[in-house]
Image (cartoon, rainbow, N blue to C red):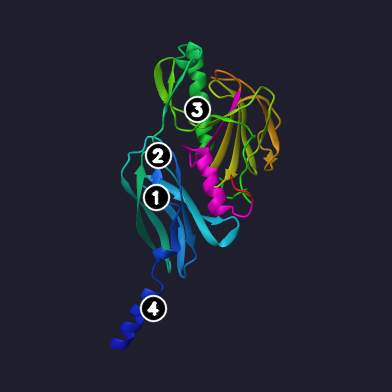
């Protein structure tokens, strides 16, 4: 009986969850950035999801390596700078279990940016304008919060155009002397009519002229990853179109709340606004290896 118990204990230990099979892109991540978690296959282990507080994030197959899985944890711009832990939810031989992993949210040290625009674009007072803004916001969030189960990603990301970056993600935005949040993307210098390209394969989720973002295209890359292209002049795609990396999707413009023509490029993960260049560099270096990196 004693040897049988020892043997049983040995078998249980043999199949126990192995944290060495879980790799983080970093144990420190700044607010507004994205954390990548990678998983190697483990015998008798079925990965299910990750939770951080009340938020839940899917665990998906690595698109280029079926022996690995991954999850993305977007960190809110206004997240507290503190030690945190997320939970890995999994099944071991059919039994639901979880493991916690510690990491730290650090300060992104973003700068301030002062901008002068038309006053009606800062504090719109008309009822119909407020209703339009609320409607457009609800429509966009419904898209961002939808997680398409399949991935369109097979190759590394590219940039939407080759140009000078005029404003980085995360800068505190002061419009006409009043603080109005932060810059939610990366601005590229682009005169009106400059071709804008899809940064990766995906499906067109929205084509619309919106109050703040002007001419807008949203691309769904699958598994909760979206890229956004704002202030466009004309569109070359329609909602529902499947697009390829490098395909022209629009021409740049100066529509919406702008001080001049440019392309505003941004990204969302599970509905959370994140630094788009950090996200795609992370995915290129860790998940979509094999071609030119940013």
Q: Residue furthest left?
A: 2
Query: What segment is highlighted magenta in the picture?
Result: 262-291
Of the two numbered discs 3 and 2 on the same chain, state the one appearing first in sequence.
Answer: 2
Of the two numbered discs 4 and 2 on the same chain, state the one appearing first in sequence.
Answer: 4
Numbered badge on residue 31: 2
Residue 157: tell me if it is visible: yes
Of the two numbered discs 2 and 1 on the same chain, state the one appearing first in sequence.
Answer: 2
Residue 123: x and y in percent read 44, 15
| Element class at badge 2 | loop
How many marks do you count on the picture?
A: 4
Of the two numbered discs 4 and 1 on the same chain, state the one appearing first in sequence.
Answer: 4
Quote the CA–CA distance across marks 4 and 2: 42 Å
User: Along the horizontal axis of the image, is 140 left or right of 86?
Assistant: right
Of the two numbered discs 3 and 1 on the same chain, state the one appearing first in sequence.
Answer: 1
Q: Is residue 264 magenta?
A: yes
Q: Residues within 10 Å of mark 3 (few under 14, many from 20)?
A: some
Question: Answer yes or no: do the residues labelled 4 and 3 have beta carbons within 8 Å?
Answer: no
Quote the CA–CA distance across marks 3 and 1: 26 Å
Residue 147: tell me if it is visible: no
Residue 211 sits in which quadrant? Answer: top right
| Element class at badge 1 | strand
Kindly identify which residue carries mark 4: 11
Kindly identify which residue carries mark 1: 51
Q: Is residue 33 magenta?
A: no
Q: Nearer the viewer, mark 2 or mark 1?
A: 2
């Amino acid at each position: 009986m004693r040897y049988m118990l020892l043997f049983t204990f040995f078998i249980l230990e043999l199949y126990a969850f192995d944290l060495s099979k879980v790799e983080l892109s970093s144990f420190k991540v700044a607010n507004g950035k994205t954390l990548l978690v990678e998983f190697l296959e483990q015998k008798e282990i079925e990965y299910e999801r990750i939770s951080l507080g009340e938020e839940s994030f899917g665990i998906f197959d690595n698109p280029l390596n079926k022996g690995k899985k991954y999850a993305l944890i977007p960190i809110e711009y206004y997240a507290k700078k503190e030690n945190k832990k997320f939970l890995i939810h999994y099944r071991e031989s059919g039994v639901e279990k979880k493991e916690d992993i510690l990491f730290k949210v650090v300060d992104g040290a973003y700068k301030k940016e002062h901008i002068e625009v038309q006053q009606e674009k800062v504090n719109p007072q008309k009822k119909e304008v407020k209703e339009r803004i609320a409607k457009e916001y609800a429509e966009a969030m419904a898209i961002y919060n939808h997680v398409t189960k399949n991935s369109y990603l097979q190759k590394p990301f590219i940039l939407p155009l080759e140009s000078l970056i005029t404003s980085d993600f995360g800068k505190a935005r002061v419009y006409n002397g009043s603080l109005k949040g932060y810059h939610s993307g990366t601005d590229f210098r682009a005169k009106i009519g400059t071709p804008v390209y899809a940064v990766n394969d995906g499906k067109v989720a929205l084509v619309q002229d919106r109050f703040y973002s002007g001419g807008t295209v949203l691309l769904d890359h699958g598994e909760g990853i979206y890229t956004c292209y704002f202030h466009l002049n004309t569109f070359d795609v329609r909602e529902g179109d499947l697009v390829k990396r490098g395909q022209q999707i629009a021409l740049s413009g100066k529509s919406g709340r702008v001080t001049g023509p440019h392309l505003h490029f941004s990204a969302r993960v599970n509905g959370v606004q994140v630094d788009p260049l950090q996200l795609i560099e992370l995915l290129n270096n860790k998940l979509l290896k094999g071609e030119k990196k940013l």
